[in-house]
Image (spheres, helix red, strand yellow):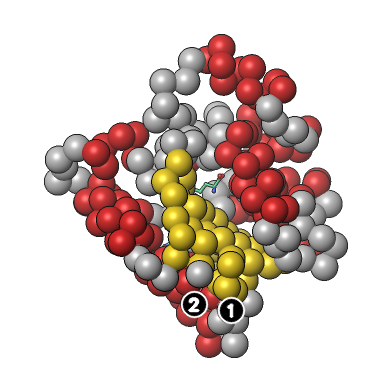
Amino acid sequence: MSRSTLNMTDVIENYIWQVGVRETAIMQQCREETAAMPNANMQIAPEQGQFLALLAQLTGARRIIEVGTFTGYSALWMASVLPGDGKLIACDISDEYTSKAKQYWQQAGITNKIDLKIKPATESLAELLAAGGAGQVDMLFIDADKIGYQDYYEQGLQLLRQGGLMAFDNTLWSGSVAELSDDPDTLALQKFNRHVHSDQRVDMGLLPIGDGLTLVRKK
Ligand SMILES: C[S@@+](CC[C@H](N)C(=O)[O-])C[C@H]1O[C@@H](n2cnc3c(N)ncnc32)[C@H](O)[C@@H]1O
């Protein structure tokens, strides 16, 4: 989700977008055209895209999995820094959203680096594991249904190599995770955040970037 839980003003946001990110013309086109869609706020912000790309570079990622692709903006950022033989496996359930994503990836010349899987992500991740994918993945970015985060976390941990990284978006959920709630998504995120915090299999941190970004490193 793009809008920050932080009290970031439009002026600061504008400044960051001018001098804090290196968004390409295709990324900008994807972001601006998506902004006209009803669910535009599902898209990550440019500074999150830049941060994910930097994380991919820092981890030397060659194999990335994305859960929740939408119109392709976050995948554009991560795939653009993959080496020529690198691969981003993009998981979504929507042909409608991802048909737009495919157009931007084509324009950006990165189609050969992206493998799109259209089915519930737990099934795609299970298939990757069944095909011998355990320990083969450098980085996962999770940005889909919040009820599924716990399953994506456990499957992601198996797929990750030691020292690999998972990033979970929306873990502050506009701040509602810090309050009492009976909303199913908020409850799922509260449970997920507590679970990650207590899980000694990983190093972790919840950062106030965008709508909250939890980073998890497999020990
Ligand atoms: C928040 S959007 C992703 C935004 C994207 N990362 C970006 O920055 O543009 C969430 C996406 O998750 C997809 N989704 C929802 N449930 C899913 C599931 N069970 N498996 C895979 N994708 C799912 C939706 O179709 C939607 O495109």
Residue in view at x 56 percent, y 34 percent: 45
The circle on residue 135 is 1
Q: Is residue 137 visible?
A: yes
- Most foreground residue, 58 or 211: 58
- The image shows residue 129, relative to residue 160, as above or below, that is below
| CA distance separating discs 2 and 1 | 6 Å
Q: Amino acid at mark 2?
A: Gln
The reply to whether the C-beta atoms of the residues labelled 2 and 1 are less than 8 Å apart is: yes
Query: Alpha-carbon neighbours of circle 1 within 10 Å: few (<14), some, or many (≥20)?
Result: some
Image x and y of residue 142, in percent:
49, 56
Left or right of 198 on screen, residue 112: right
Q: Quadrant of residue 114?
A: bottom right
| Residue that extends furthest to the top in the rendered view of this protein | 11
Q: Is residue 116 visible?
A: no
Left or right of 30 on screen, residue 38: left
Q: Quadrant of residue 131?
A: bottom right
Residue in view at x 33 percent, y 57 percent: 197
Left or right of 7 on screen, residue 10: right
Image x and y of residue 92, in percent:
52, 60
Residue in view at x 62 percent, y 71 percent: 137
Left or right of 199 on screen, residue 86: right
Image x and y of residue 72, in percent:
63, 48
- Most foreground residue, 105 or 11: 11
Indicate which disc, 2 or 1, sits on the residue closer to the N terminus.
1
Residue in view at x 54 percent, y 75 percent: 159
Which residue position is annotated with label 2? 158
The residue carrying mark 2 has its beta carbon less than 8 Å from ligand 1: no
